[in-house]
Each structure stands twice: as structure tokens, then as C-alpha cells.
């Protein structure tokens, strides 16, 4: 049996929409990403913020610029689909 890690949630915040960044997010996390606004996504994945940056090509500057922040709590006002998406992935096991 393989050891699996807990999935973390990451907010990706770019200054604006960037087609290269969006393509990288969709390619690397096709079922585990949700676009919540222009230049803003939530990703469910294992690893660290740097791991996500490396996977997307942000670290080397290949796909533009953005800030990636992991989070474990959330609160605010948003559409129901965003809350449902977050709740369905919060603490889920990957693998």
C-alpha cells in the first residue's frame, strides 16, 4: 500500500489573467483547480507552495508571475459552487 499525503488547498493570485499560467494550471491540475476570478485559482494538491510553483513553471519564470499561498481555513462570501468545491477537497487524501 502506497503512502498518500493529505491534500492541501492553495490560492494562486496573479496580477491579471495570463494565458500561459492558466494553461499550465489546467494541464497540471485538470480536475483539482477552480478559477474563482481573473488571475485567481484554488488548487487542491499535495506538497508545498514551492512545489506547486515548480510544477507550474512559476519558479523559473516560464509562465509569468503569481503568488501561491496554502491555506487550511476559509471564510467569506462567494458562490455556492466555490464553497462546495473547497469543502469537497479540504483534507481529502490523494493517490
Image (cartoon, helix red, strand yellow):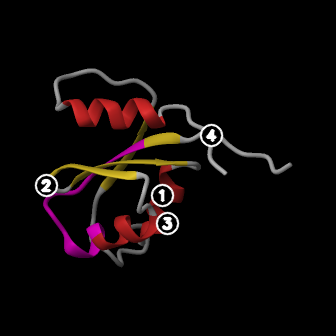
If you read the primary sequence from the N terminus, does the residue marked by circle 4 or circle 2 appear first?
2
- Checking the image for residue 93, the label placed there is 4
Residue 27 to residue 53: above or below: below
Q: Residues within 10 Å of mark 3 (few under 14, many from 20)?
A: some
Numbered disc in front, either 1 or 4: 4
* Residue indicated by mark 2: 38
Q: At 27% from the left edge and 65% from the top edge, which residue is drawn? A: 65
Mark nearest the camera among 1 and 2 is: 2
Label 1 and label 3: CA atoms lie apart by: 5 Å
Which residue has dot 1 on it? 52
Q: Along the horizontal axis of the image, is 72 left or right of 82?
A: right
Give the mark nearest the N terminus, 1 or 4.
1
Tell me which numbered mark, 1 or 2, is placed earlier along the sequence.
2
Establish if 60 lies above or below 15: below
Give the image location of residue 2, x and y in percent: 81, 51
Label disc, if present, on residue 64 of the rendered structure = none
Stretch in magenta: 10-22
Question: Mark 4: which secondary structure?
Answer: loop
- Of 69 and 25, nearer the camera is 25
The percent coordinates of residue 91 (x first, y second) are 55, 32
Give the spatial CA distance, label 1 vs label 4.
17 Å
Contact (Cβ within 8 Å) of mark 4 with mark 2: no
Label 4, label 2: how far apart the Cα atoms are: 29 Å
**Image position of 95 (left or right of 44):** right
Can you tell which mark lies on residue 54? 3
Residue contact between numbered discs 1 and 3, judged by CB atoms under 8 Å: yes
- Considering only vertical position in the picture, is 16 above or below 2? below
The Cα–Cα distance between marks 1 and 2, rounded to whole angstroms, is 19 Å
Amino acid at each position: 500500500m502506497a503512502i498518500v499525503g493529505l491534500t492541501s488547498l492553495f490560492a494562486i493570485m496573479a496580477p491579471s489573467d495570463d494565458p500561459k499560467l492558466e494553461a499550465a494550471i489546467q494541464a497540471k491540475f485538470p480536475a483539482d483547480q477552480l478559477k474563482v476570478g481573473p488571475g485567481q485559482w484554488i488548487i487542491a494538491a499535495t506538497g508545498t507552495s514551492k512545489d506547486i510553483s515548480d510544477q507550474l513553471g512559476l519558479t523559473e519564470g516560464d509562465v509569468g508571475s503569481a503568488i501561491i499561498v496554502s491555506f487550511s481555513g476559509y471564510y467569506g462570501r462567494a458562490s455556492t459552487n466555490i464553497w462546495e468545491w473547497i469543502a469537497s477537497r479540504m483534507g481529502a487524501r490523494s493517490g
